[in-house]
Image (cartoon, rainbow, N blue to C red):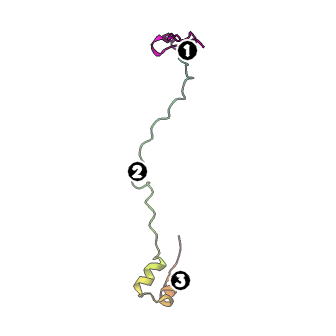
Amino acid sequence: MPTNDKPRMEQGTLFDLPTPEPSTPTAIHSTPPSKPKPKPTSPAHNKDALKPYVPRHIPYADYLKMFNGISELALYWFNKQALKE
């Protein structure tokens, strides 16, 4: 095995590496024409706007609090209310 200090040709040194060739810019792909955007609609009038949902019944937990944990009274009044949603 030879003991010379020169690196072999296959094994380049860090500073002997060839500089990378500048790459040519790739062609920009043209995008198909976009669909026409719809016209912005005017905001709905206040009378036509939907109002946020507000439950119209009292939850069972609230009845339990009202009757200090007496489940018979809470269940009676909870079932008595009309659940028309």
Location of residue 62 by image quarter: bottom left
Which comes before the other along the chain, label 2 or label 3? Answer: 2
In the image, what residue type sits under mark 3?
Asn
**Residue at image mark 1:** 11
Tell me what residue is drawn at x 47 percent, y 35 percent: 39
Which disc number belongs to residue 45?
A: 2
Residue farthest to the right, as pictured = 1
Which disc number belongs to residue 79?
A: 3
Depicted 63 relative to depicted 48: above or below: below
User: Percent position (x, y) of residue 38?
Assistant: 50, 35
* Highlighted magenta segment, given as a residue range: 1-25
Tell me what residue is drawn at x 45 percent, y 38 percent: 40
In the image, what residue type sits under mark 1?
Gln
* The N terminus - image quarter: top right
Q: Secondary structure at mark 1?
A: loop
Q: CA distance from mark 2 to mark 3?
A: 38 Å
